[in-house]
Image (cartoon, grey):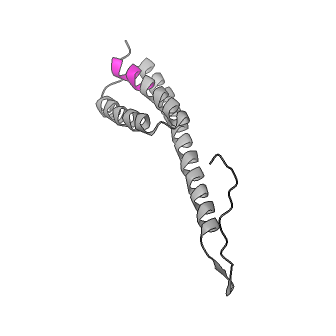
Amino acid sequence: MISQELLELKKVVENERIALINGAIEEILKWASYKARLAKYLKDKELTPQEKRILKEIIIQNEHNKKIIQAGINFIEEAYRFLTDLLEEKEIYGINKIKREPKIFSKTA
């Protein structure tokens, strides 16, 4: 029989993915915290072969979530770098760039 905690962990990882895709920060934090508690509980538990297969699926799903998180971080870093370059005065090879008013690329932003 599959442990209830393992099945719950599978649901939590799926819910975490949905929250990541939706950008729901509060939910992401909630699921991550719950996931950590379940993982800690399951850490030293003896698993059946069927449970081990399910755990491998969970690990793969968790790696996908990690990639979503990393993509989001990369996007934020790039956007921050872009805005910083746009708004800061720069000096290149001893020649000051002329500081201009920032351009708005989208009226909805």
**Furthest residue to the bottom?**
94
Total marks placed: 0
As drawn, is 11 to the left or to the right of 103?
left
Q: Nearer the viewer, residue 76 or 109?
A: 109
**Residue 61 at x, y = what percent?**
52, 31
* Magenta run includes residue 8: yes
- Tell me the residue at 61%/57% (across/down): 78
- Tell me the residue at 67%/49% (across/down): 107
Looking at the rendered image, the quarter that the N terminus falls into is top left
Magenta-drawn stretch, dominant element (helix, strand or loop): helix
- Magenta extent: 4-10
* Magenta run includes residue 52: no
Residue 33, by quadrant, is: top left
- Tell me the residue at 61%/75% (across/down): 89
As drawn, is 3 to the left or to the right of 84?
left
As drawn, is 104 to the left or to the right of 58?
right
As drawn, is 106 to the left or to the right of 77?
right
Residue 55, by quadrant, is: top left
Q: Nearer the viewer, residue 46 or 90?
A: 90
Q: Considering only vertical position in the picture, is 25 above or below 80?
A: above
Q: Nearer the viewer, residue 46 or 100?
A: 100
Q: Considering only vertical position in the picture, is 53 above or below 25?
A: above
- Tell me the residue at 59%/71% (across/down): 88
**Furthest residue to the top?**
1
**Residue 100 at x, y = what percent?**
67, 72
**Residue 59 at x, y = what percent?**
48, 33
Q: Considering only vertical position in the picture, is 7 above or below 39?
A: above
